[in-house]
Amino acid sequence: MDRIVVLSGAGLSAEQGLGTFRDKGGLWRHYDLGDVATPQGFARDPDLVHRFYNARRANMRAAAPGAAHDALARLSQRPGITLVTQNVDDLLERAGARDVIHMHGELARALCHACGARWDAPARMAPTDPCPRCTARHTRPDVVWFGEIPHHMDRIEAALARADLFVSIGTSGTVYPAAGFVEMARTAGAQTLELNLEASGGRFDAIRKGPASQLVPNWVAEVLRQ
Ligand code: NAD
């Protein structure tokens, strides 16, 4: 297996307390996605949206990478690995992972809606923050909202087209375009593997069920032994 594309989702960081969309009592449960994860919601109430992401950023900074993040960081040192994540947290980077492709953006970064500048987000963002480059007060978290185009799609699709193995970790396969990656990989002739607490229902050649903290280190050890 020379070329491997890994796609991770909220399940990778669930055991670190960051919460998936579906967790009972999770942060997402208290908010309507349309209010906090769409450009329209941000236009209606930027203060609410900043409060939501400030809370998520604080949770992220209080969390530490787990065994699954550490294992993927080891794997990322090997040639031929493309590490794509839907997660906006920075736990893979903090575990030492190289070249993580954040297709849905990063909580740790801020974006100016007016000029496109990006910079490290402060702990607390507010609607009145000026952009450090153009001074416009249109700054937002650098996360991709529903209705927006994910980042780095050209690079991801190129990696899927030449993949020998596609591995999906802790994602429900409900948010497109990431949900379509398994079919793209199959079409390209890759083997497909899912690592998840519960099978997502996607068309995988093999499925291993269990927590990411166990499945991912075991699978990475197998790959690194080859
Ligand atoms: P989702 O909530 O739809 O699905 C989570 C998946 O993780 C489920 O399939 C579940 O079975 C699995 N899972 C839960 N706990 C697990 C564990 N311990 N080990 C292995 N698998 C586990 O999340 P998704 O598919 O990533 O949805 C995509 C969207 O969620 C993305 O847009 C992403 O940006 C956003 N999101 C990100 C974070 C984060 O950055 N940490 C957190 C919540 C949601």
Image (cartoon, grey):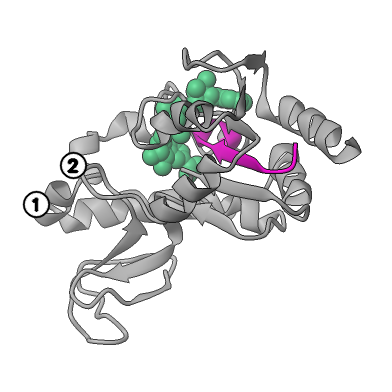
Quadrant of the rendering where the N terminus is positioned = top right
Judging by the rendered image, the residue that carries numbered circle 1 is 44
What span is in magenta?
A: 1-13
The residue located at (85%, 35%) in the rendering is 221
- Residue 155 at x, y percent in the picture: 47, 55
- Residue 72 at x, y percent in the picture: 71, 44
The residue located at (33%, 34%) in the rendering is 176
Q: CA distance from mark 1 to mark 2?
A: 8 Å
Q: Secondary structure at mark 1?
A: helix
User: Toward which corner of the image does residue 117 lie, by quadrant?
Assistant: bottom left
Residue 112 vertical placement versus 44 (above, below): below
> Which residue is at the front of the view, 88 or 104?
104
- Residue 142 in the magenta stretch? The answer is no
The disc labelled 1 sits on which kind of residue? Arg
The disc labelled 2 sits on which kind of residue? Asp
> Which residue is at the front of the view, 5 or 143?
5
Task: Judge from the rendering whether residue 94 lies leftward or rightward of residue 46; answer left or right.
Answer: right
Q: Residues within 10 Å of mark 2 (few under 14, many from 20)?
A: some
Which mark identifies residue 35?
2
The residue located at (45%, 24%) in the rendering is 172
Task: Judge from the rendering whether residue 62 lies leftward or rightward of residue 174; answer left or right.
Answer: right
- Residue 77 at x, y percent in the picture: 77, 56
Residue 2 vertical placement versus 152 (above, below): above
Residue 223 vertical placement versus 100 (above, below): above
User: Toward which corner of the image does residue 119 lie, by quadrant?
Assistant: bottom left
Q: Residue furthest left?
A: 44
Q: Are marks 1 and 2 in contact (CB under 8 Å)?
A: yes
